[in-house]
Image (tube, rainbow, N blue to C red):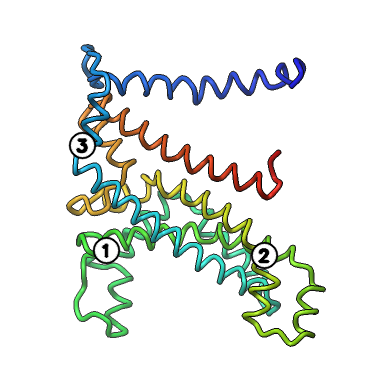
């Protein structure tokens, strides 16, 4: 890059250094200490925080919960998003209205979405219990967010409802790029619906959907707000994710050093996912 290019980038680099670089450096420094939020005594402990985290069974339980949340949410968002995109790519009356309505869940603030689903799953007056009771699937109201066996599925349901439209919109945009001539040729050749999808449509969807899945995986791995509002990580830590663990250690228990080490481990995993994302973009020719 030329000197002029670096001069043009200098304001952006300065902003990124201030907004991203300094907090990261501060967190890294704290992770090697026993710092507490309301204590002025800070002692260097080296890798003790990381050793404590990586040898604690509770950390791997939280990591397992986070991975299960990612797999369930992203998997369901992929399936529902693809099906919604294929449906909205067809010509029928009211298609434009449905396309507009599809954006609403994704456009809602996460706080509003989480509060709405917490009310829907309420064990006393929630609409979900009322629906299941009326159609005969259950005979008594249940506390879906208060039972370890169902709480994680409930928060996954809320997350999928909010975020599958993003996958659907990306897939729908990719479907618009499929040449009509290819579709018409496949029909003339006598290809069935599945054959047309696999041979004609799928190649145009693989790249965009892969990028969408990676982006949603990164977001789901660091999920905090929707789970915190709905369950606070409970019951019995059944919905506690790594982001919630960081919050509890750093702020609730005021262990800034230990919380910083967990946060840095999250950053490492996110960095791997981001590297995968950039690699996929380069393979598609979006980055050079």
CA–CA distance in space, label 1 to label 2: 43 Å
- Tag of residue 55: 3
Secondary element type, mark 2: helix
Most distant residue in the bottom direction: 190
**Residues at marks 1 and 3 touching, judged by CB atoms closer than 8 Å:** no
Location of the N terminus (image quadrant): top right
Query: In the image, what residue occupies the spot 24% across and 42% down?
Result: 59
Going from the N terminus, do you reach mark 3 or mark 2 first?
3
Dot 2 alpha-carbon crowd within 10 angstroms: few under 14, some 14 to 19, many 20 or more: few
Spot occupied by residue 160 in the image (x, y as percentages of width and height): 44, 61
Q: Find residue 250 and report its image quarter.
A: top left
Location of mark 1 (residue)? 122
In the visual, does 103 lie left or right of 236?
right
Location of mark 2 (residue)? 203
- Which residue occupies the foreground of this view, 47 or 235? 47
Spot occupied by residue 56 in the image (x, y as percentages of width and height): 19, 39
Query: Which of pointers 1 and 2 indicates the residue nearer the eye?
Result: 2
Secondary element type, mark 1: loop
CA–CA distance in space, label 3 to label 2: 44 Å
- Tag of residue 257: none
Location of the C terminus (image quadrant): top right
Q: Find residue 134 and report its image quarter.
A: bottom left
Spot occupied by residue 184 in the image (x, y as percentages of width and height): 79, 79
Dot 3 alpha-carbon crowd within 10 angstroms: few under 14, some 14 to 19, many 20 or more: few
Spot occupied by residue 77 in the image (x, y as percentages of width and height): 48, 62
Is 166 drawn above or below residue 23 in the view shown? below
Going from the N terminus, do you reach mark 1 or mark 3 first?
3
Dot 1 alpha-carbon crowd within 10 angstroms: few under 14, some 14 to 19, many 20 or more: some
Residue 14 visible in this rendered orientation of the protein: yes
Secondary element type, mark 3: loop
**Residues at marks 3 and 2 touching, judged by CB atoms closer than 8 Å:** no
Query: In the image, what residue occupies the spot 59% across and 18% down?
Result: 14
């Amino acid at each position: 890059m030329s000197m002029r290019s670096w001069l043009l980038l200098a304001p952006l680099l300065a902003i990124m250094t201030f907004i991203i670089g300094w907090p990261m450096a501060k967190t890294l420094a704290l992770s090697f200490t026993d710092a507490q939020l309301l204590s002025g005594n800070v002692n260097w402990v080296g890798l003790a925080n990381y050793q404590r985290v990586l040898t604690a069974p509770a950390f791997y339980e939280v990591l397992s919960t986070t991975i299960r949340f990612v797999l369930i949410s992203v998997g369901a968002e992929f399936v529902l998003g693809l099906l919604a995109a294929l449906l909205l790519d067809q010509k029928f009356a009211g298609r434009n209205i449905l396309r507009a309505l599809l954006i609403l869940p994704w456009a809602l603030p996460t706080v509003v979405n989480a509060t709405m689903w917490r009310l829907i799953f309420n064990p006393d007056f929630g609409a979900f219990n009322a629906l299941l009771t009326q159609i005969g699937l259950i005979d008594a109201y249940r506390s879906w967010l208060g039972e370890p066996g169902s709480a994680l599925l409930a928060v996954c349901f809320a997350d999928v409802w909010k975020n599958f439209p993003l996958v659907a919109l990306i897939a729908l945009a990719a479907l618009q790029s499929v040449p009509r001539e290819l579709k018409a040729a496949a029909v003339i050749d006598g290809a069935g619906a599945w054959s047309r999808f696999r041979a004609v449509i799928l190649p145009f969807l693989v790249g965009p959907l892969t990028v969408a899945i990676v982006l949603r995986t990164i977001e789901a791995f660091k999920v905090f707000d929707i789970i915190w509002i709905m369950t606070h990580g409970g019951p019995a830590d059944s919905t506690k994710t790594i982001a919630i663990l960081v919050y509890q250690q750093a702020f609730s228990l005021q262990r800034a050093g230990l919380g910083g080490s967990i946060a840095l481990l999250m950053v490492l995993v996110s960095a791997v996912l981001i590297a995968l994302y950039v690699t996929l973009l380069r393979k598609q020719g979006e980055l050079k």
